[in-house]
Image: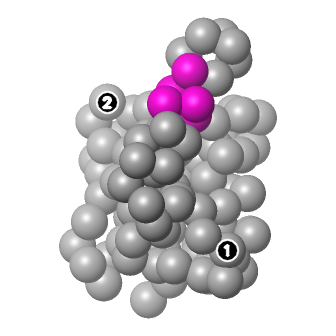
């Protein structure tokens, strides 16, 4: 069963995950979250109701937050492009840059 991504197309944090999925041709079902039934379904999966959210039914995992989703994809659904460096120190440095841009530059 493919992964399910709950997102909104105008949310830049969602695009981080979309880029990772498309870069590795990872199959997924897109679920655009809006008003009504789509939002109710989304809130049942993640009561905080912030997107993006990845649902992996095969592993029974619900993964929130763009950076965490990308790390999850790198570990459990790797593709031809390494999304996270294999070296732990390089991975930490990459995570720091990612968080810096998300928390200080992007805002």
Scheme by which the image is coloured: one colour
Q: From the viewer's perspective, is the residue at label 1 or at label 2 nearer? A: 1
User: Where residue 12 sits in the image (x, y, percent)?
Assistant: 71, 34
Report whether 91 appears left or right of 21. left
Main secondary structure along the magenta-highlighted residues: helix
Q: Indicate whether residue 45 is drawn in magenta.
A: no
Identify the element where label 1 is drawn. loop
- Whether label 1 touches label 2, CB < 8 Å: no
Q: Residue 58's mark?
A: none
Is residue 33 visible in the rendered structure shown here?
no
Q: Quadrant of the N terminus?
A: bottom left
Position in image of residue 79 (x %, y %): 60, 81
Asked if residue 46 is positioned above or below residue 83 in the image, the reply reads above
Left or right: where does residue 58 sit relative to residue 106?
left
Q: As displayed, is residue 56 above or below residue 107?
A: below
Q: Nearer the viewer, residue 47 or 86?
A: 86
Q: Nearer the viewer, residue 32 or 58?
A: 58
Name the residue tied to disc 2. Answer: 48
Distance from disc 1 to disc 2, alpha carbons, whole Å, reads 31 Å
Density class for disc 1 (Cα within 10 Å; few <14, some 14-19, many ≥20) is few
- State the residue at coordinates (46%, 50%): 91
Magenta-drawn segment: 96-100
- Is residue 55 rendered to the left or right of residue 16? left
Q: Residue furthest left?
A: 60
At x 54%, y 42%, the residue is 94
Disc 1: which residue? 81
**Residue at (26% x, 78% y) in the render:** 59
Q: Is residue 72 visible?
A: yes
Q: Quadrant of the C terminus?
A: top right
Residue 24 is situated, as x and y percent measured from the top left of the image, at 69, 76
Which residue: 66% across, 83% down?
80
Of the numbered discs 1 and 2, the one sitting upstream in the chain is: 2
């Amino acid at each position: 069963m493919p992964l399910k991504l709950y997102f909104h197309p105008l949310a830049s944090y969602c695009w981080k995950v979309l880029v990772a999925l498309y870069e590795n041709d990872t199959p997924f079902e897109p679920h655009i979250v809006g008003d009504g039934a789509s939002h109710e379904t989304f809130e049942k999966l993640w009561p905080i109701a912030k997107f993006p959210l990845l649902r992996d039914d095969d592993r029974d995992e619900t993964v929130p937050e763009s950076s965490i989703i990308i790390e999850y994809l790198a570990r459990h659904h790797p593709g031809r492009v390494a999304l996270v460096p294999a070296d732990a120190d390089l991975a930490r440095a990459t995570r720091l840059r990612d968080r810096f841009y998300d928390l200080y530059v992007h805002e």
